[in-house]
Protein backbone atom coordinates (compact mmCIF):
# COMPACT_ATOMS: atom_id res chain seq x y z
CA UNK A 1 0.00 0.00 0.00
CA UNK A 2 1.17 3.51 -0.68
CA UNK A 3 1.59 6.12 2.10
CA UNK A 4 -1.91 7.51 1.56
CA UNK A 5 -3.64 4.18 2.17
CA UNK A 6 -2.26 3.20 5.56
CA UNK A 7 -4.88 1.94 7.99
CA UNK A 8 -4.79 2.81 11.69
CA UNK A 9 -2.58 0.04 13.10
CA UNK A 10 -1.06 -0.76 16.46
CA UNK A 11 1.92 -2.77 17.65
CA UNK A 12 1.43 -3.76 21.29
CA UNK A 13 4.75 -4.80 22.86
CA UNK A 14 4.62 -6.31 26.34
CA UNK A 15 8.20 -5.96 27.53
CA UNK A 16 10.10 -8.91 29.00
CA UNK A 17 9.97 -9.38 32.74
CA UNK A 18 13.01 -7.75 34.29
CA UNK A 19 15.42 -9.62 36.54
CA UNK A 20 13.59 -8.20 39.53
CA UNK A 21 10.42 -9.87 38.40
CA UNK A 22 8.55 -6.62 37.84
CA UNK A 23 6.74 -5.91 34.59
CA UNK A 24 7.10 -2.45 33.02
CA UNK A 25 4.11 -0.50 31.84
CA UNK A 26 2.66 -1.43 28.47
CA UNK A 27 4.21 0.37 25.50
CA UNK A 28 2.01 0.83 22.44
CA UNK A 29 3.38 1.90 19.10
CA UNK A 30 0.82 3.25 16.69
CA UNK A 31 1.19 4.20 13.05
CA UNK A 32 -1.37 6.51 11.52
CA UNK A 33 -1.47 8.19 8.17
CA UNK A 34 -3.89 10.48 6.47
CA UNK A 35 -4.33 12.71 3.48
CA UNK A 36 -3.94 16.43 3.80
CA UNK A 37 -6.94 18.19 5.30
CA UNK A 38 -5.99 21.38 3.48
CA UNK A 39 -3.61 22.15 0.65
CA UNK A 40 -3.07 25.02 -1.74
CA UNK A 41 -0.38 26.70 -3.77
CA UNK A 42 0.42 30.40 -3.88
CA UNK A 43 1.88 32.11 -6.93
CA UNK A 44 3.90 35.32 -6.89
CA UNK A 45 2.90 36.07 -10.50
CA UNK A 46 -0.83 35.87 -9.58
CA UNK A 47 -0.56 37.36 -6.08
CA UNK A 48 -4.25 37.79 -5.32
CA UNK A 49 -5.49 34.53 -6.86
CA UNK A 50 -6.40 31.53 -4.72
CA UNK A 51 -5.32 28.11 -6.01
CA UNK A 52 -6.84 25.99 -3.26
CA UNK A 53 -9.08 23.79 -5.37
CA UNK A 54 -6.87 22.83 -8.28
CA UNK A 55 -5.48 19.40 -9.08
CA UNK A 56 -1.80 20.26 -8.80
CA UNK A 57 0.50 21.91 -6.27
CA UNK A 58 3.26 23.94 -7.91
CA UNK A 59 6.72 24.78 -6.53
CA UNK A 60 9.39 26.92 -8.19
CA UNK A 61 12.19 29.33 -7.46
CA UNK A 62 11.33 32.98 -7.92
CA UNK A 63 14.37 34.26 -9.83
CA UNK A 64 14.01 34.31 -13.59
CA UNK A 65 15.84 35.93 -16.48
CA UNK A 66 18.06 38.81 -15.43
CA UNK A 67 17.67 37.92 -11.78
CA UNK A 68 14.13 39.29 -11.58
CA UNK A 69 12.31 37.99 -8.49
CA UNK A 70 8.68 37.57 -9.51
CA UNK A 71 8.00 33.90 -10.32
CA UNK A 72 8.05 32.00 -7.02
CA UNK A 73 5.45 29.32 -6.34
CA UNK A 74 4.96 27.54 -3.01
CA UNK A 75 2.86 24.60 -1.80
CA UNK A 76 0.98 24.81 1.51
CA UNK A 77 -0.14 21.70 3.42
CA UNK A 78 -1.97 21.05 6.68
CA UNK A 79 -2.77 17.73 8.36
CA UNK A 80 -5.08 17.01 11.30
CA UNK A 81 -3.04 15.64 14.23
CA UNK A 82 -5.88 15.57 16.77
CA UNK A 83 -6.00 11.75 16.86
CA UNK A 84 -2.49 11.60 18.38
CA UNK A 85 -2.68 11.87 22.20
CA UNK A 86 -0.74 14.66 23.83
CA UNK A 87 2.33 13.23 25.55
CA UNK A 88 2.97 10.65 22.84
CA UNK A 89 6.53 10.05 21.73
CA UNK A 90 6.80 10.66 17.99
CA UNK A 91 9.18 8.04 16.61
CA UNK A 92 9.04 9.23 13.05
CA UNK A 93 6.87 11.36 10.80
CA UNK A 94 7.11 11.72 7.04
CA UNK A 95 5.30 14.09 4.70
CA UNK A 96 4.73 12.55 1.26
CA UNK A 97 3.95 14.31 -2.04
CA UNK A 98 3.61 12.61 -5.40
CA UNK A 99 5.79 14.29 -8.03
CA UNK A 100 3.70 14.04 -11.19
CA UNK A 101 5.09 16.51 -13.71
CA UNK A 102 6.81 19.78 -14.42
CA UNK A 103 6.75 22.91 -16.55
CA UNK A 104 9.47 24.48 -18.67
CA UNK A 105 12.66 22.76 -17.38
CA UNK A 106 13.05 19.33 -15.80
CA UNK A 107 13.55 19.91 -12.03
CA UNK A 108 15.22 16.54 -11.45
CA UNK A 109 18.01 16.92 -8.90
CA UNK A 110 16.71 20.18 -7.43
CA UNK A 111 16.28 20.26 -3.65
CA UNK A 112 12.98 21.41 -2.17
CA UNK A 113 12.76 22.56 1.43
CA UNK A 114 9.96 21.97 3.92
CA UNK A 115 9.32 24.76 6.46
CA UNK A 116 6.96 24.83 9.45
CA UNK A 117 4.33 27.54 9.15
CA UNK A 118 3.84 30.10 11.92
CA UNK A 119 0.43 31.41 10.88
CA UNK A 120 -2.99 30.03 10.07
CA UNK A 121 -4.20 29.96 6.46
CA UNK A 122 -7.27 28.82 4.59
CA UNK A 123 -7.41 26.48 1.62
CA UNK A 124 -9.89 28.65 -0.27
CA UNK A 125 -8.47 32.00 0.85
CA UNK A 126 -4.67 31.60 0.73
CA UNK A 127 -2.91 33.76 -1.86
CA UNK A 128 0.61 35.03 -2.37
CA UNK A 129 -0.40 38.31 -0.75
CA UNK A 130 -1.64 36.70 2.49
CA UNK A 131 0.49 33.54 2.56
CA UNK A 132 1.53 32.33 6.04
CA UNK A 133 4.98 33.13 7.34
CA UNK A 134 7.20 30.21 8.23
CA UNK A 135 10.19 29.58 10.47
CA UNK A 136 13.53 30.55 8.97
CA UNK A 137 15.21 27.19 9.57
CA UNK A 138 14.32 24.37 7.20
CA UNK A 139 12.72 21.24 8.68
CA UNK A 140 13.86 18.88 5.92
CA UNK A 141 14.99 18.72 2.31
CA UNK A 142 13.95 16.32 -0.42
CA UNK A 143 15.48 15.99 -3.88
CA UNK A 144 13.29 15.84 -6.98
CA UNK A 145 13.85 12.38 -8.52
CA UNK A 146 14.68 11.67 -12.15
CA UNK A 147 11.34 9.93 -12.61
CA UNK A 148 7.88 10.73 -11.31
CA UNK A 149 7.05 9.22 -7.92
CA UNK A 150 6.78 9.86 -4.20
CA UNK A 151 8.96 12.44 -2.46
CA UNK A 152 9.28 12.46 1.34
CA UNK A 153 10.29 15.01 3.98
CA UNK A 154 11.12 13.94 7.57
CA UNK A 155 9.08 16.14 9.91
CA UNK A 156 9.43 14.16 13.14
CA UNK A 157 10.52 17.03 15.38
CA UNK A 158 7.84 19.38 14.05
CA UNK A 159 5.09 16.84 14.73
CA UNK A 160 6.46 16.21 18.24
CA UNK A 161 6.35 19.95 19.03
CA UNK A 162 2.82 20.20 17.61
CA UNK A 163 1.52 17.22 19.59
CA UNK A 164 3.15 18.58 22.76
CA UNK A 165 1.46 21.95 22.12
CA UNK A 166 4.86 23.66 22.12
CA UNK A 167 3.97 25.15 18.74
CA UNK A 168 0.67 25.50 16.90
CA UNK A 169 -0.10 23.20 14.00
CA UNK A 170 -0.29 25.44 10.95
CA UNK A 171 1.20 22.85 8.60
CA UNK A 172 4.14 23.32 6.25
CA UNK A 173 5.35 25.25 3.22
CA UNK A 174 7.30 23.54 0.42
CA UNK A 175 9.75 25.86 -1.39
CA UNK A 176 12.49 25.83 -4.00
CA UNK A 177 15.17 28.19 -2.68
CA UNK A 178 17.91 27.33 -5.17
CA UNK A 179 18.60 30.39 -7.32
CA UNK A 180 17.78 29.92 -11.02
CA UNK A 181 18.33 33.36 -12.59
CA UNK A 182 17.40 32.62 -16.21
CA UNK A 183 14.39 31.81 -18.36
CA UNK A 184 12.36 28.58 -18.21
CA UNK A 185 12.38 28.22 -14.42
CA UNK A 186 11.75 24.59 -13.38
CA UNK A 187 8.25 24.25 -11.92
CA UNK A 188 7.71 21.04 -9.94
CA UNK A 189 4.15 19.69 -9.94
CA UNK A 190 2.58 17.51 -7.23
CA UNK A 191 -0.87 16.01 -7.05
CA UNK A 192 -3.12 17.88 -4.61
CA UNK A 193 -5.85 16.39 -2.42
CA UNK A 194 -8.36 17.27 -5.14
CA UNK A 195 -7.04 14.37 -7.21
CA UNK A 196 -9.37 11.36 -6.94
CA UNK A 197 -6.61 8.80 -6.65
CA UNK A 198 -4.18 7.18 -4.22
CA UNK A 199 -1.59 9.86 -4.95
CA UNK A 200 -2.85 12.60 -2.64
CA UNK A 201 -0.52 14.33 -0.14
CA UNK A 202 -0.05 12.18 2.94
CA UNK A 203 1.47 12.41 6.43
CA UNK A 204 2.60 9.13 8.03
CA UNK A 205 3.27 9.23 11.79
CA UNK A 206 4.59 6.48 14.04
CA UNK A 207 4.29 7.20 17.76
CA UNK A 208 4.31 5.40 21.11
CA UNK A 209 2.26 5.81 24.26
CA UNK A 210 2.41 4.39 27.79
CA UNK A 211 -0.38 2.54 29.55
CA UNK A 212 -0.97 0.56 32.72
CA UNK A 213 0.84 -2.74 33.28
CA UNK A 214 -1.16 -5.63 31.78
CA UNK A 215 -2.34 -8.68 33.67
CA UNK A 216 -1.63 -11.13 30.86
CA UNK A 217 1.77 -12.75 30.10
CA UNK A 218 4.14 -11.11 27.63
CA UNK A 219 3.13 -11.15 23.98
CA UNK A 220 4.51 -9.41 20.93
CA UNK A 221 2.29 -8.42 18.01
CA UNK A 222 4.36 -7.61 14.97
CA UNK A 223 3.33 -5.50 12.02
CA UNK A 224 5.29 -4.08 9.12
CA UNK A 225 5.99 -0.44 9.80
CA UNK A 226 7.91 0.11 6.57
CA UNK A 227 6.07 2.19 3.96
CA UNK A 228 5.14 0.27 0.85
CA UNK A 229 4.02 1.48 -2.54
CA UNK A 230 1.05 -0.19 -4.17
CA UNK A 231 1.71 -1.07 -7.79
CA UNK A 232 -0.08 1.33 -10.11
CA UNK A 233 -2.66 0.10 -12.55
CA UNK A 234 -1.78 0.40 -16.21
CA UNK A 235 -4.00 3.45 -16.63
CA UNK A 236 -2.60 5.13 -13.48
CA UNK A 237 0.97 4.51 -14.60
CA UNK A 238 0.26 5.95 -18.02
CA UNK A 239 -1.31 9.05 -16.45
CA UNK A 240 1.45 9.47 -13.87
CA UNK A 241 4.24 9.37 -16.42
CA UNK A 242 2.49 11.41 -19.10
CA UNK A 243 4.80 14.35 -19.87
CA UNK A 244 3.41 17.71 -18.79
CA UNK A 245 4.33 21.24 -19.78
CA UNK A 246 8.05 20.81 -20.27
CA UNK A 247 10.26 22.38 -22.92
CA UNK A 248 9.27 19.71 -25.45
CA UNK A 249 5.60 20.43 -24.85
CA UNK A 250 6.15 24.14 -25.24
CA UNK A 251 7.93 23.59 -28.52
CA UNK A 252 4.90 21.70 -29.80
CA UNK A 253 2.79 24.88 -29.92
CA UNK A 254 3.64 28.29 -31.32
CA UNK A 255 3.32 31.56 -29.44
CA UNK A 256 -0.21 32.84 -29.91
CA UNK A 257 -1.72 29.38 -30.34
CA UNK A 258 -3.74 29.81 -27.16
CA UNK A 259 -6.19 26.98 -27.79
CA UNK A 260 -3.33 24.66 -28.80
CA UNK A 261 -4.98 23.46 -31.99
CA UNK A 262 -1.76 23.78 -33.96
CA UNK A 263 -2.51 27.07 -35.72
CA UNK A 264 -2.67 30.76 -34.77
CA UNK A 265 -5.97 32.08 -36.11
CA UNK A 266 -9.16 33.90 -35.19
CA UNK A 267 -10.10 31.13 -32.75
CA UNK A 268 -7.30 32.34 -30.48
CA UNK A 269 -8.54 35.93 -30.25
CA UNK A 270 -10.97 35.40 -27.36
CA UNK A 271 -8.32 33.57 -25.38
CA UNK A 272 -5.80 36.33 -25.99
CA UNK A 273 -8.29 39.04 -25.00
CA UNK A 274 -9.05 37.28 -21.72
CA UNK A 275 -5.35 36.80 -20.97
CA UNK A 276 -4.60 40.49 -21.50
CA UNK A 277 -7.69 41.87 -19.73
CA UNK A 278 -7.76 39.53 -16.72
CA UNK A 279 -4.55 37.53 -16.45
CA UNK A 280 -5.15 36.06 -13.00
CA UNK A 281 -8.64 34.91 -13.94
CA UNK A 282 -7.28 33.47 -17.18
CA UNK A 283 -4.65 31.48 -15.27
CA UNK A 284 -7.20 30.20 -12.75
CA UNK A 285 -9.74 29.26 -15.44
CA UNK A 286 -7.13 27.32 -17.39
CA UNK A 287 -5.72 25.31 -14.51
CA UNK A 288 -5.97 21.53 -14.18
CA UNK A 289 -5.60 19.28 -17.22
CA UNK A 290 -6.22 22.06 -19.73
CA UNK A 291 -3.52 24.18 -18.13
CA UNK A 292 -1.03 21.35 -18.48
CA UNK A 293 -1.92 20.79 -22.13
CA UNK A 294 -1.97 24.45 -23.17
CA UNK A 295 0.47 26.84 -21.53
CA UNK A 296 -1.14 30.25 -20.79
CA UNK A 297 2.27 31.85 -21.30
CA UNK A 298 1.80 31.32 -25.02
CA UNK A 299 0.01 34.68 -24.73
CA UNK A 300 3.34 36.39 -23.95
CA UNK A 301 3.95 37.02 -27.65
CA UNK A 302 6.81 39.51 -27.26
CA UNK A 303 8.52 37.30 -24.64
CA UNK A 304 9.09 40.08 -22.10
CA UNK A 305 7.86 37.99 -19.18
CA UNK A 306 4.46 39.71 -18.99
CA UNK A 307 1.10 39.31 -20.70
CA UNK A 308 -0.37 42.74 -21.43
CA UNK A 309 -1.31 45.18 -24.20
CA UNK A 310 2.31 45.27 -25.34
CA UNK A 311 1.71 41.81 -26.81
CA UNK A 312 -1.16 43.07 -28.99
CA UNK A 313 0.91 44.24 -31.96
CA UNK A 314 2.92 41.01 -32.08
CA UNK A 315 -0.28 38.95 -31.83
CA UNK A 316 -1.82 40.92 -34.70
CA UNK A 317 1.25 40.19 -36.83
CA UNK A 318 0.86 36.48 -36.15
CA UNK A 319 -2.76 36.71 -37.31
CA UNK A 320 -1.64 38.50 -40.45
CA UNK A 321 -3.79 41.56 -39.74
Image (spheres, helix red, strand yellow):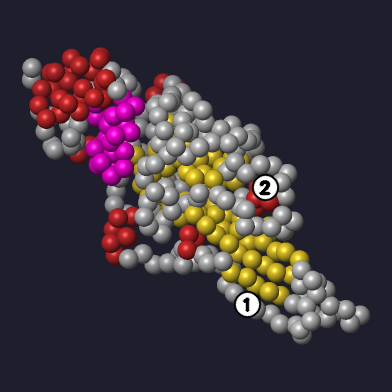
Identify the residue at horizontal 32%, vertical 60% (top origin): 237
Which class describes the residues within 10 Å of circle 1: few (<14), some (14-19), or many (20+)?
few
Picture disc at residue 222: 1
**Element at badge 2?**
helix
**Element at badge 1?**
loop
Identify the residue at horizontal 37%, vertical 42% (top origin): 54
Residue 226, x across and y down, in percent: 56, 67
Residue 292 on the magenta segment = yes
Residue farthest toward the bottom in the current orientation of the protein: 217
Q: Is residue 62 visible?
A: no
Residue 233, x across and y down, in percent: 32, 66
Q: Can residue 124 be seen in this view?
A: yes
Identify the residue at horizontal 42%, vertical 39% (top origin): 52
Which class describes the residues within 10 Å of circle 2: few (<14), some (14-19), or many (20+)?
some
Picture disc at residue 135: none
Q: Which of marks 2 and 1 is nearer the N terminus?
A: 2
Q: Is the magenta stretch mostly helix, strand or loop?
A: helix
As displayed, is residue 228 above or below residue 77? below
Residue 276 on the magenta segment = no
As displayed, is residue 154 above or below residue 114? below
Q: Which of 21 and 99 is in front in this view?
A: 21
Mark 2 → mark 1, Cα distance in angstroms: 28 Å
Q: Mark 2 points at which residue?
A: 162
- 204 relative to 317 in the view: left or right: right
**Bounds of the magenta span?**
279-299
Identify the residue at horizontal 29%, vertical 48% (top origin): 243
Amino acid sequence: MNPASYKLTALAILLAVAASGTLPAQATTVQVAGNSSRDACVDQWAPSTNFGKIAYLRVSNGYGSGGQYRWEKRALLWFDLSSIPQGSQIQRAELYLYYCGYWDTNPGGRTLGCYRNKQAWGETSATWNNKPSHVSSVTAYSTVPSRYGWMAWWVTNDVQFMVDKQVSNYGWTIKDNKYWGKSNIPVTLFYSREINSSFRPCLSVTYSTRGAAPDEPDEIYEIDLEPEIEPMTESEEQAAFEPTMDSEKQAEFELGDLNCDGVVDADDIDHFSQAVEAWETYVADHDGELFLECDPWLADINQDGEVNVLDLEAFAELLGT
